[in-house]
Image (tube, helix red, strand yellow):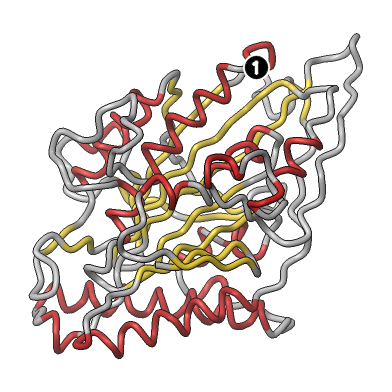
Amino acid sequence: MCTWGCLSLRVYGPAESQSAVFGDVCPLLTSLLDGYNVCVMAYGQTGSGKSYTMLGPHSDDGPVLPLDPQSDLGIIPRAAEELFRLVSENPSRSPKVEVSIVEVYNNDIFDLLAKDTVAAVSGVKREVMTAKDGRTEVALLASEAVDSASKLMELVRGGLQLRAKHPTLVHADSSRSHLIITVTLTTAASSDSTADQACSATLPREQTEAGRAGRSCRTSQGASAPQPVLGDPTGPAEQVQARLQLVDLAGSECIGMSGVTRSALRETACINRSLAALADVLGALSEHRGHVPYRNSRLTHLLQDCLGGDAKLLVILCISPSQRHLAQTLQGLGFGIRARQVQRGPARKRPPSSQTEGKRRPD
């Protein structure tokens, strides 16, 4: 397994713990509270360990919180617990956490938290659009406010039950869709600079305090330290909104080895095309082309902000050590090379907005 945070690279062996892998994610959660958008994405072939890395061992009961330090739980439950731990340290900023969950299945977007999904198999179909501020959004997307890591993971478990799956010869419980969990954190703008915290997240592990218990603290190259924002004490309260996107991509697949037919064959074709579109986007970004083909796939259109925008992006590449999967492994490594070659501008904190901004006027 490899992780890329822009140009930073770390390779994990099969004996590495889930806690060690989360070490690359943990500093990004501090950046989230500082107002930066963050995306953590797992890529790899079917059965290579993406869902295990992001969620942990498969269980119908779901993860149990709080975490045992030696637990095999993945990045998502660990991030949920760490986020609320950080939020609890500064309640004066009136933090609000909201969650939305979508899957991209057969190049369509489905809302897995929509209220009318009780009798649905794959949620409610939605469309991606560009908002007035230039960000990509999903129209009519359902979101739920949560006040604890347990509540967040309860929503995740409910969304996973609706996620499209199909057994193949490679994986008995193969995910047939890309899962995107978006956590939106809204806090009151702080007049105190948090530059010291953000700076520590950009230093090599050996330069941070005690290596943060052995955790790697690499983030996007050139990330600028956030500047303090001074609001007008007599005016409306200003708010900072930042998004954390946790992406468990569907696995690339060789049709001959997976043995899929009929509807599963179409699923495989859509998965491979969307992953190829993702690689094309990274290729265009690495070569600084004038046109980046985000809209060639709904997956890349939906992830446009974190791929080419100002978010801090961490790519986790999961590969198989098996000789029979060599071709897929080489393809995955090629994807990783493209991701590593992307040189984006410095990550930027989103400016605060007035609390009254965007409110609907009464009729």
Give x and y (percent) for residue 159.
Answer: 27, 41
Q: Nearer the viewer, residue 78 or 338?
A: 78
Residue beneath the point at 13% across and 80% down? 258
Give the mark count.
1
Residue 217 vs 8, above or below: the answer is: above
Residue beneath the point at 60% across and 62% down? 5
Q: Nearer the viewer, residue 261 or 312?
A: 312
Q: Secondary structure at mark 1?
A: loop
Left-right relation of 263 to 93: left
Q: Quadrant of the N terminus?
A: bottom left
Give x and y (percent) for residue 296.
Answer: 50, 76
Q: Nearer the viewer, residue 286 or 321?
A: 321
Residue located beneath label 1 in the image: 90
Residue 270 vs 222, above or below: the answer is: below
Left-right relation of 259 to 54: left
- Report crowding for label 1: few under 14, some 14 to 19, many 20 or more residues within 10 A (C-alpha): few
Give x and y (percent) for residue 15.
Answer: 31, 59
The quarter of the picture where residue 144 lies is top left
Q: Nearer the viewer, residue 359 or 265?
A: 265
Which amino acid type corresponds to the residue marked 1 in the rendered image? Asn
Left-right relation of 48 to 187: left
Residue 244 vs 15, above or below: the answer is: above
Give x and y (percent) for residue 24.
Answer: 53, 51
Residue beneath the point at 29% across and 70% down? 251
Q: Quadrant of the C terminus?
A: top right
